[in-house]
Image (spheres, rainbow, N blue to C red):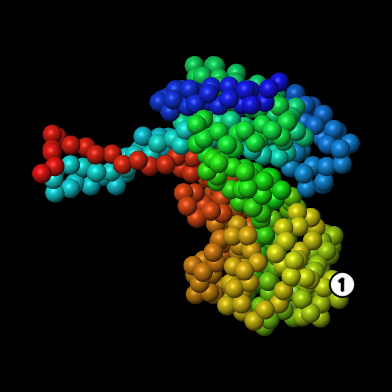
Amino acid sequence: MDIQQYMISVGSQAREASRHIARAGINAKNAALFALARAIRRDSGALLATNQEDIAAARVAGLEPAMLDRLTLTEKSVAAMADGIEQIAALPDPVGEITDLKLRPSGIQVGRMRVPLGVVGIIYEARPGVTADAAALCLKSGNAAILRGGSEAIRSNRAIATLVHESLVTAGLPPHAVQVIDNTDRAAVGCLITMREYVDVIVPRGGKGLIARLLAEARVPMIQHLDGNCHVYLDDDAEPEMSVRIVENAKTQRYGTCNTAESLLVARSRADDLLPPVAAMLRERGVEIRGCAETRKWVKEALPASEEDYASEFLAPIISVKVLDGIDEAIAHINRYGSHHTDTIVTGNYTKALRFLREVDSASVMVNASTRFADGFEYGLGAEIGISTDKIHARGPVGLEGLTSQKWVVLGTGQVRG
């Protein structure tokens, strides 16, 4: 197969389909989404069996545990996939919404209309659920999608793509509105990220190696985040039981996700009563603690932490810990070492909570809640196409609104400019 010709064909079909899907009505788009949710539930057994083939091949290839975790589908995750699609269908259609309409002295009315981005290219590793989520979000927001999953999930992605195309045809929409690249050659990615004439934005979901490559080579604009070094800060006014509960969930619920806590910060005035129970919980769950000298005073099993540890996304049962003077040092530490993804403070002090919300420079900033809530489904977006740590256009979980832009519209009654 000539990869360049294949990708040009995919791109041109996506561009043509994007014009049809941009003007599709809400009823047709929702019909496709409900059909997709039904098809996923109907074929859940087949999807799980196909996914097991991918997992078996990935184990033989020596895929890392974090990637295996992302690759794996379960009955619960397949059901959640269908539920998320129906939640997207239930959301208001953003396309065509006119806001901020103002009457000008000339008599014209000036406002903004929300419109699709056009063709969205999504590049992702493992995570076959992204195929369904991305297809649904792009469809509802009036965009065509080109999906390029990793080779480790090729069987699962093909199976889901078949159901997506079935649902589009059922609703009378062009099947090329969602295309899954049926080729594992890395050259396909090189083509996708440079096809400005066909692709309007790229959304990468993967490890640092993938993101670094795209940042170096892409000519198409991107919505992306590099990694997820998320923090939990236990403030001077933190409640002990809440602290243990939040750290436990933020760190140990899942190790392979970008919203998992990788760093724990503890106010010095509370290290003696907060660190021991938190550390005991982490040790019980097999988490390796790497800490500063003060951390090691309270936690004898802790290993010395390096500068690199404080900046690392471990994606593993490892956490860095630092005892510091208070909220000023905590905010400075997070803004220096963090990845601007998600950070949370545990505190009973309202003033400090507001300071943390204002001054921590991250896409999601939380008070008294686990970082694991940084997710499109949990935020009520139905699902997410990715997480953005950029500051322009979209930030945080990217849902329907993040897949649209606004253009100016002017309504007149015959006015001319003098």
User: From where the camera sits, is residue 409 visible?
Assistant: yes
Q: Which quadrant holds residue 115?
A: top left
Q: Nearer the viewer, residue 413 or 193?
A: 193
Total numbered labels placed on residues in the image? 1
- Mark 1 is surrounded, within 10 Å at the Cα level, by few (under 14), some (14 to 19) or many (20 or more) other residues, namely some
Q: Could you say whether the residue bearing mark 1 is in a helix, strand or loop?
A: loop
Q: Position of residue 408 (x, y in %)?
A: 31, 42
Q: Give the camera-side residue of 243 and 112.
A: 112
Q: Residue at x 68, y 74 (%)?
A: 266
Instruction: Classify residue 88 as left or right of residue 153.
Output: left
Residue 210, given in percent of the width and then of the height, sits at: 69, 45
Left or right of 395 on screen, residue 211: right
Can residue 257 be seen from the camera position used here?
A: no
| Residue in the image at 55% along x and 19% along y | 175
Q: Residue furthest right?
A: 60
Q: Which residue is tagged 1?
A: 301
**Residue drawn 63% across the image and 23% down it:** 6
Residue 48 image-quadrant placement: top right
Position of residue 42 relative to residue 206, above or below, is: above
Query: Where does the image place residue 336, in percent across and percent down from the top left?
Result: 62, 69
Q: Quadrant of residue 233?
A: bottom right
Identify which amino acid the numbered label 1 is placed on.
Glu
